[in-house]
Every structure is written in C-alpha cells, then in structure tokens.
Image (spheres, grey):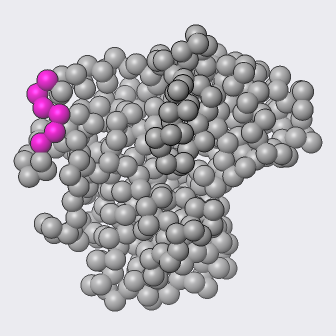
Amino acid sequence: MNIREKEEKYFFKTYNRLPIEISHGEGMYLFSKDGKKYLDMFGGLAVNALGYGNQKIIRAISEQIKKFIHVSNYYLQEQQIYFAELLIKYTGYHKVFLCNSGTEAVEGAIKIARKWGQQNNKSGIISFTNDFHGRTLGALSITGQSKYRDTFEPLLPDCFLIPYNDVDSLKLNVNNKTVAVVIEFIQGEGGIIQASEEFVLMLKKLKDEYGFLIIADEIQSGLGRTGKLFSFQHYDISPDIVVTAKSLGGGLPLGGILGNNLVADVFQPGDHGSTFGGNPVACAAGIVVLNEIIEGGLMKNAELMGKIMKSKLIDLKSEFPSIVFDVRGLGLMLGMEISQESESIMTSLREKGVLINCTNNNVLRFLPPLIIQREHVNFAVEQLRSVLKHL
C-alpha cells in the first residue's frame, strides 16, 4: 500500500488531505518528497508564525528535551513559569491557564464563565453566526456554523446564537441572565469578516449595563497576526477573558486562557486541569515565539506586509471585478471572496508552487508565516493573477 491507501485504512475520515507528501520545510517554503517547492501562504493554518526550521526554536526545544520532556503539573517548572510571566507581561492580563489547543482554551473559558455566573445568578452564553470556536462539544455549542454542529446535537444548554454584526439582535438578546458573550473580532473560518465599530461599541455599552463577561477568541487572529498582539486591540474594548493557541507554541501544541482581575480567582485547585497543558518543551518554544513576535519585530512586519499584500489583492479585485467580490482583513489575516467555489483556484495555485487555503467555500484565505517578505507577497499575487486570468 502507498501512503494514501494506508491513511484511508488506518484513520477516521476526518481530513481531506492535499495530494502532497511533505519532506521538510525551510523558512517560508515546504518541500515535497518529489522535489517540488511550495510557498506556504497559510502557515499550518496560522500556526507557523516563525516559518519552518527556525533555529532559535530548535535550540530552545533541544535544550529542554535534554532536561526533561514532561513532568506532572504538580511540580513547578521553570520554563512554564517564565513563559507565563512573558504572557502576562506582554498582554497585561493577570492570570493564565495553559493547555494544548484552542478548543481546550475555549472549553476552559466556558467553565470560568459558568462558575463565575453561578456566583452572579447568570448562565446564558451568547455567540454569533459564522463564528468558529473548536470541535469539542462545549466549543461546538457556541460555534455558529451548522455544518459543524448539527450532527452532534444536543449541545450545551443556555447557549444562544445570534447574527454577527447585528446591533439590534445584540440589544434584543442580552439580558440580566447573560453570563458571557464570546466573539471573534475577525472571524476566521467564517470568511475573514471583521466586527463593525458600531457592533463593538454596543457590546461594550451592554456589558456596562448588564455586567457580563466578554470572551475574545484570538486563536487564529492573535499573537501579532493582525499587526497588533490581539485583534480586539483594533477597537476600544478590553475583554475579560482571551483564548489563544495556534502560533503560541511555534508548531508544538500549546494554548492559553488569559483572564483579568474580574475572573482571576474563579478557578480553585481541582476545578480545572490538564495533563499535558504547559508542556515544558512547548513552553520553551513559546518563549521564543513571544520574543520574536514582539521584541523581534514580526508583529510590525505583519502589519507592513499585510498592508502591501492587501493593496495588491485589491488591485486584483479592480482587475477582475466579475471574479473577485471583496478583499478584507487586517495584517496577515486576509480573505478574498470570489464568485465561485475556490477549490479549482487552490489546485491551480498549488500547481504553480503556492499553497493557500479556502474558507466558507468561496473565500481564499491568506495566513502566511509572519516572517514573509515583499518578494514572497509579489510571487504569490502574481501566481494568483495568472490563475484568475484563465478563469
């Protein structure tokens, strides 16, 4: 059997794999076993912020592995504590819980909200259509896409989906029983759609009136990708809880829940935990990631390269108005909405040596490593132009 036949034999049918066998990665590029070179414009779905083969990450991981790969969270671990210290320093939040993934961070945030709500006689959680928060049962309960939810119902009670960016619906549905509003300030899986200023202002006003928690999902949009550490920082708002993951561990499983003083004392010993959360090897990589993004200038690079790329994509919209409907996003979290399903465009670009991803059926999604340079942007856009010309 070849590798694809083995995959079909041994795995549950959960992924539509691309027809590429990866041999290695270097910088912005992936290389296949048949010798082809691909410019990676979605970076492991926003995970590989520092690209492939980053030597600082490799050294940090190697040094930690020599000491120990895992010990129980019953023990104090220097790498874990230092990593948490950096997270608090750079984000301004007061407490952190470390886990392995975004969906685990969401599950933990739901637990914080529900326990906090018991003390305040609140239980309702509001989230929005097109939001995506993960595939575990709690995360699905607040995910606003039926294709992920429907076959796994019934989900958690007291979870309410309302239209995204609908101010009137927000006013109508928030009340004294609302414990939390969970929001992506830029929807990733939903098609790179940004919250409107009016919507965020109303959310902030209603929070002041009803006293609920705001939970910001920054799993895909966070850690410098939009040109700021978190996407909510493009607005005048400060969420109570922030969930983050993806690029946090430099390619290793690592997620986090950040909380302000309002929720800092909600969890007590035994309320929550994780066997592997805050793994010391992942934390060693995470220290490098945080330093490179913030002190090493990658967040500024994301802002600059994102502006350049967005401008070039807007030029394509002008050049191909019957194909390209919209270009949107911030920094290096960009989407191009097109007039057809995007599978054929993805395939054509892959044949030209560019890997991109699509979301919401007809939105080309660009989530490249934050190390991207102008020549990479130029190459990707020119290949896309070539493909659009032949449609």
The quadrant in which residue 50 appears is: top left
Residue at 59% over, 25% down: 20
356 relative to 52, above or below:
below
Q: As rendered, which of 308 and 6 lies closer to the eye?
A: 6
The quadrant in which residue 63 appears is: top left
156 relative to 51, above or below:
below
Residue range in magenta is: 66-71
Image coordinates of residue 217 in percent, x first then y, are: 46, 57
Residue at 40% over, 61% down: 106
Tell whether 353 sits left or right of 216: right
| Residue lying farthest to the left in this orientation | 75
Q: As rendered, which of 286 and 142 lies closer to the eye?
A: 142
Q: Is residue 205 in view? A: no
284 relative to 13, above or below:
above
Q: Residue 85 magenta-drawn?
A: no
Quarter holding the C terminus is: top right
Image coordinates of residue 234 in percent, x first then y, are: 54, 51
Tell whether 150 sits left or right of 309: left
Tell whether 359 sits left or right of 143: right
Residue at 42% over, 68% down: 138
288 relative to 85, above or below:
above
